[in-house]
């Protein structure tokens, strides 16, 4: 009847309105649930999920290809497994660690006819083994570190003593890339923490001597611009080449990081390192810093023959953390001011994307119009699961205890889970951070996701300040903690 129909309609309308009214409380409830989740456990869970994929489809190989359920090889040395060793130890994943240790003991051999990149194998393999040795006291890792360290030494046999980029660890020969005799400046200046530590542990000075010769030469080299270094250095002449381009991003980034960290590693005695670092930060302030329109986000641009290009690699997001570490160690307070500003910008590089994940490169708006602060070119829209922003969030939280840094890191972890997690195990790089419907998975889990990204997230959320105290350890550029030398060393 008409009356019955009206009653049903009334009832439906009533239920609909009740649904709308209860929505905010549902949202609220959801928020409370998320807050209650133990963030530290969420990182352990993410690690286990990544490890599950690696174990199932890539065990003992360099990288997991989680979509095609297979592996990729770079050096053929179990790169992900070695990079992840100290992360497992720090996260307290004892069973996973034990399995990986067994592989290192029984399967890992460096006596192989393979070309490896000196920098990448130093920061990931040598750094990973040294740090795992320090955390565990297990000499298996020290023995392996000595083996790979010794096998990398032929790289330094060049006319200038500036090392070649590639070494054959089986044959003991080294060479530059096929197309040039140049090496990358960041690469030759970001192997020092590891080789210096190897010398200290072995009492064999050859490692330290080789890398400090590079530091000495770069220190006095012509072609810097207010302490900023070009991106290439020639292995024959020992001079900077392709001068005129200055960036804190790819090919130069960790040069700056290692100036500060070597100074810390050595107990703040090597004043030339400190001088170069301080000069470089002044150079950044004078030449590369700009603010966006309309929101006045501070960023570090790139200089190309005197012209400022308003773009910044995600790689540059290591800088807030490094600046904060310097300020914590007595360097000027305005370094911390800059760190706070750059941290906000790196956060915005995630928050303003539709997936909540940063692109590889951001372009910034300098025009005083009402455009967006951040623009991303189609070719730069990928995210490789890189660590630099969560690395800096970790430093910023340790030094300020401002909980917003934890919240920002939590948002990033959730975005990784939402857009890069592969159900059968593992996480994947994606090609388009602007497309939440189909972010275009790339089918690759980089070893630094386990070596760095998840480790820094765990340390960010952990309340244990003594877990890798920043007054006792320096992290190498692949997040492997190495001890600050005791003053008697
Ligand atoms: C890592 O291998 C290191 O952090 C390096 O310093 C830069 N590139 C990757 C991570 O982005």
Image (tube, rainbow, N blue to C red):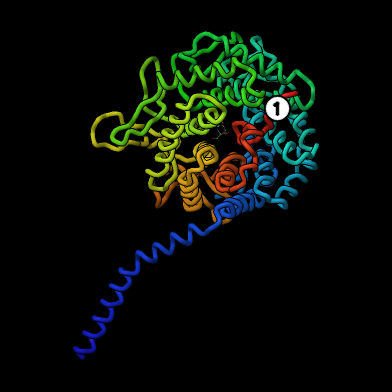
Above or below, 291 relative to 18? above
Q: Quadrant of residue 467?
A: top right
- Is residue 399 at least partly visible in the picture? yes
| Ligand 1: image quarter | top right
At a point 64% along the width and 31% down the height, the residue shown is 123
Q: Position of residue 131 (x, y in %)?
A: 70, 36
At a point 66% along the width and 16% down the height, the residue shown is 212
In the depicted view, which residue is nearer to us: 268 or 405? 268
- Is residue 81 at least partly visible in the picture? no
At a point 33% along the width and 71% down the height, the residue shown is 19
Apparent side of residue 271 relative to residue 31 in the rendered image (left or right): right
Apparent side of residue 186 relative to residue 17 in the rendered image (left or right): right
Apparent side of residue 31 relative to residue 14 in the rendered image (left or right): right
The residue carrying mark 1 is 485
Q: How many marks?
A: 1
The quarter of the picture where the C terminus appears is: top right
The quarter of the picture where the N terminus appears is: bottom left
Q: Position of residue 37 (x, y in %)?
A: 53, 58
In the depicted view, which residue is nearer to us: 176 or 257? 257
In the depicted view, which residue is nearer to us: 45 or 282? 282
Q: Secondary structure at mark 1?
A: loop
Q: Position of residue 283 (x, y in %)?
A: 45, 18
Q: Residue furthest left?
A: 2
Q: Position of residue 245 (x, y in %)?
A: 44, 18
Q: Quadrant of residue 137?
A: top right
Q: Is mark 1 within 8 Å of ligand 1?
A: no
Above or below, 242 relative to 460? above
Q: Quadrant of residue 309?
A: top left
């Amino acid at each position: 009847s008409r009356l019955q129909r009206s009653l049903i309609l009334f009832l439906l309308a009533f239920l609909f309105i009740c649904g709308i009214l209860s929505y905010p409380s549902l949202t609220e409830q959801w928020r409370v649930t998320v807050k209650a989740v133990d963030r530290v456990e969420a990182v352990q869970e993410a690690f286990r999920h990544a490890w599950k994929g690696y174990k199932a489809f890539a065990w003992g190989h360099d990288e997991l290809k989680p979509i095609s359920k297979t592996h990729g090889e770079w050096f053929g040395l179990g790169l992900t497994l070695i990079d992840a060793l100290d992360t497992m130890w720090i996260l307290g994943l004892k069973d996973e660690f034990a399995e990986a240790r067994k592989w290192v003991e029984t399967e890992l051999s460096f006596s192989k006819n393979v070309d490896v990149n000196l920098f990448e194998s130093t920061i990931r393999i040598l750094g990973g083994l040294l740090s795992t040795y320090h955390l565990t006291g297990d000499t298996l890792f020290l023995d392996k570190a000595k083996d790979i360290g010794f096998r990398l030494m032929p790289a330094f046999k060049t006319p200038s003593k500036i090392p070649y980029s590639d070494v054959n660890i089986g044959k003991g020969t080294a060479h530059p890339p096929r197309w040039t005799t140049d090496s990358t400046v960041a690469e030759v200046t970001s192997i020092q923490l590891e080789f210096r530590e190897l010398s200290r542990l072995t009492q064999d000075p050859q490692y330290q001597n080789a890398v400090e010769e590079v530091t000495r030469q770069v220190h006095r080299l012509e072609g810097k611009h207010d302490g900023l270094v070009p991106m290439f250095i020639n292995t024959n002449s020992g001079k900077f080449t392709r001068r005129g381009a200055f960036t804190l991003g790819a090919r130069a980034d960790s040069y700056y990081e290692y100036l500060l960290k070597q100074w810390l590693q050595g107990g703040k005695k090597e004043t030339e390192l400190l001088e170069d670092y301080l000069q470089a930060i002044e150079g950044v302030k004078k030449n590369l810093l700009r603010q966006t329109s309309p929101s006045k986000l501070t960023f570090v641009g790139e200089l190309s023959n005197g012209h400022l290009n308003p773009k910044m690699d995600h790689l540059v997001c290591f800088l807030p953390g490094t600046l904060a570490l310097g300020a914590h160690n007595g360097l000027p307070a305005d370094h911390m001011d800059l760190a706070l500003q750059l941290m906000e910008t790196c956060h915005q590089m995630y928050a303003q994307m539709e997936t909540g994940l940063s692109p590889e490169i951001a372009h910034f708006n300098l025009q005083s119009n009402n455009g967006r602060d951040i623009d991303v070119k189609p070719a730069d829209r990928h995210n490789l699961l890189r660590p630099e922003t969560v690395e800096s969030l970790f430093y910023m939280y340790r030094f300020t205890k401002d909980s917003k840094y934890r919240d920002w890191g939590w948002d990033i972890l959730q975005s990784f889970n939402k857009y890069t997690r592969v159900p059968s195990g593992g996480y994947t790089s994606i090609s388009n951070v602007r497309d939440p419907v189909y972010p275009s998975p790339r089918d690759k889990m980089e070893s630094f996701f386990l070596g760095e990204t998840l480790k820094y997230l765990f340390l960010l959320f952990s309340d244990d300040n003594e877990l890798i105290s920043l007054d006792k350890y320096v992290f190498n550029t692949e997040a492997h903690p190495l001890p600050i030398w005791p003053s008697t060393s």
